[in-house]
Amino acid sequence: MKVLIAEDDAASRKLLRYFIGSLPDYKIVGEATNGEELIKYVTKEKPDIALVDIGMPLMDGMEAVKACKELFPSLQVIFTTGHDDYALEAFNVRAVDYILKPIERNRLYSALERAAQAGKLKAGKEPSAKKNLTIKQHKNIIFIPLDEIIFIEREDRKSVIYTRNNKFETNETLASLEEALDSRFIASHRSCIINMRLLIKIEAAGQGYKAYFKDYDRSAKVSKHKIDELQRYMS
């Protein structure tokens, strides 16, 4: 795996070189000290993985990564930063991980492994054999195609299943519904399960976050502690 380091701090670059140097499957192909150099190195070397600091001169790491992703969508990005303010933006650019300094060896190695796997399996998860979610509604049995489910939300004492054109209410718990779904669905909040394949962005909303979906106006709740899990899926 070809790795590019983008970091303006010499000591941090040295530490990353030291950590990666002991991994035979990873080769450092360049070191950028600002955002503009990052874009040039990505264009020239076409690395598999980029380790990127956000607070760099000329162009910050986040903006540079956005530009790189437009050119090379398969680039796997691991942010290494001293600030936690950009975690949500990191999710929206589908970063593999967001590591706060000081960088721990095992955390870095875990992120590199996930980045390597994500690069190899970019096509995504294997298609599910499941086709429908079966629910009971009064005396009826309803079959809802999984592809049409956008999210499920617990409202009062009912679970409400939202599709693009309809919504269905059932007395079944979120836990029981989650067991009947496939791996594309993740509990984003204690009261919500979302379809990750339809997710397009997450935005901050007060003390929490909201998930937004392709061609759909309604949003779903996202807990702060779920951001990392959703980010790992999207990478």
Image: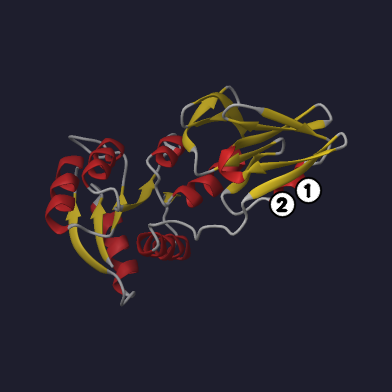
Q: Is residue 113 visible?
A: yes
Q: Position of residue 185 (x, y in %)?
A: 60, 47
Classify residue 3 as left or right of residue 149.
left
Label ID, residue 145: none
Q: Position of residue 56 (x, y in %)?
A: 25, 40
Mark 1 surroundings within 10 Å by alpha-carbon count, few (fewer than 14), some (14 through 19), many (20 or more): few
Q: Is residue 223 visible?
A: no
Q: Residue at x 69, y 46 (%)?
A: 133
- Furthest residue toward bottom: 24
The residue identified by callout 2 is 180
- Furthest residue toward front: 140
Residue at mark 1 to residue at mark 2: CA–CA distance? 7 Å
Front-most of 145 and 17? 145
Q: Residue at x 60, y 39 (%)?
A: 194
Q: Quadrant of residue 68?
A: top left
**Element type at mark 2:** helix
**Is mark 1 in CB contact (under 8 Å) with mark 2?**
yes
The residue identified by callout 1 is 176
Q: Quadrant of residue 93?
A: top left
Quadrant position of the N terminus in the picture: bottom left
Q: Residue at x 31, y 46 (%)?
A: 53
Give the answer, above or below, for where 151 lies relative to 8: above
**Element type at mark 1:** helix
Amino acid type at mark 1: Ser
Q: Position of residue 83 (x, y in %)?
A: 42, 39
Q: Position of residue 15 (x, y in %)?
A: 31, 61
Amino acid type at mark 2: Ala
How many marks the image carries: the answer is: 2
Give the answer, above or below, for where 113 lies relative to 6: below
Front-most of 146 and 71? 146
Q: Quadrant of residue 31?
A: bottom left
